[in-house]
Amino acid sequence: MKKFVYLALLLLTACELPPRGATHSTTLRTVASSTETGATEEYVMVTTAVTMPMYVNHDQATFRRWGEQRGVKVSVLGPADWDVPAQINTIEEVIGTHPTGLLINGTDPALAPVINKAVAAGIPTVVYDSDIPNSNRHAFLGTDWYEIGQMQGREMVRLLNGKGKIAYMGLLGLTNMEAGFRGLLDAIKNYPGLEVVGKFDDKSNVEEAARITSDLLAAHPDLAGLCGFDSNSGPGMALAVREAGRAGKVKITTVDWEPEHLRLVQEGVIHMLAGQKRALFTWYGAQFLYDMVHQTNPLGHTSRPDITTIPATVNTGLLRITKENVAGFLNTTPPQ
């Protein structure tokens, strides 16, 4: 029996993707106009850890809102926990139903073969969050993770005046986070006064990030800074430094801007957030799929299968959130 549970958030429709009976083809499927098909179109998002608040509040809420405005069906599928093999299995099953478009969270390079299978089946396929370089995806939208690392490194240099012991953590082995780690190290390499005492895998778990931080504080009482690279790094690090009575003294930079992250910035426990514009990932990713299907902006010779009418790569940019500007983010409620 499979060890994961599919959590299907069918945002405008029933609980299962109906089989469409379409003939699979390497030719991209298109329709003449939206009025001919309307709500019979179905766009499917496949991710992992579908219950993660960051995904629910930003990616999925925006995808639902996009579907409502377009008058089409949207579905979110995948395992409840962080389980890439389960995500791959979900994509395999979705390919068999031949949806109108497929929006995939690029969690791991191992997704490349199944993404290529979707494209070969004629399904418009867009990847978001982290690119899958060896795939044939039609487009990628996301953040430059190297720049996330650079932003944190520059901020740590500023906060510590270029001197002190620091450590960093995230999900080791992921393409995007490894790029972020490189960006961090490149940003601080010209500051010999900054000593990196460790790189740690917090498994995107608050308790694990707190445990690692507690151990670091015990081993290095003079620890000066911490950099986090997944959504749960910051809250975990903040929990541990508070318990150690070091809040505000150990400088913390991290990613994402959930309400908890923002409150910790306001309280002076976290010093900077490198915020991703996640709502743009799925809004424009879904719109790219729609534009491909409806040939919204045709180019010359678009009958060729190797030519698509959407951008190949989109960098959605970053938000720098500190105590000076956090109030504006706390007072902003994302539309649902």
Image (spheres, rainbow, N blue to C red):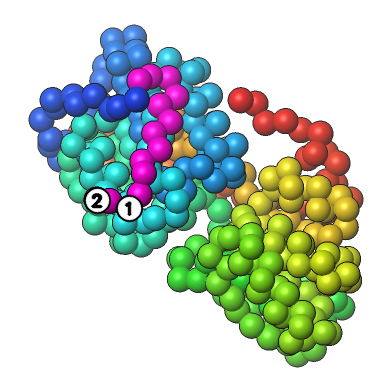
Residue 279 lies left or right of residue 284; in this view the side is right
Residue 325 lies left or right of residue 85; in this view the side is right
Q: Position of residue 202 (x, y in %)?
A: 58, 68
- Give the Cα separation between the discs numbered 2 and 1: 6 Å
Secondary structure under badge 2? loop
Residue beneath disc 1: 3
Identity of the amino acid at label 2?
Answer: Met
Q: Is residue 18 above or below residue 284?
A: above
Q: Position of residue 264 (x, y in %)?
A: 81, 53
Spot the residue most to the top: 35
Is the residue marked by circle 1 packed among few (<14), some (14-19), or many (20+) residues within 10 Å? few
Q: For this rendering, which residue is in front, 98 or 88?
A: 88
Residue plotted at (88% across, 66% down): 248
Residue beneath disc 2: 1
Spot the residue most to the bottom: 192
- Residue 281 in view (yes/no): no
- Residue 83 in view (yes/no): yes
Kindly indicate the quadrant of the structure image that contains residue 93: top left
Residue plotted at (45% across, 66% down): 175
Q: Is residue 263 above or below residue 29?
A: below
Residue plotted at (88% across, 53% down): 267
The label on residue 285 is none
Q: Position of residue 232 (x, y in %)?
A: 63, 57
Kindly indicate the quadrant of the structure image that contains residue 54: top right
Q: Is residue 193 above or below residue 157?
A: below
Q: Which residues are magenta?
A: 1-14
Residue plotted at (31% across, 20% down): 41
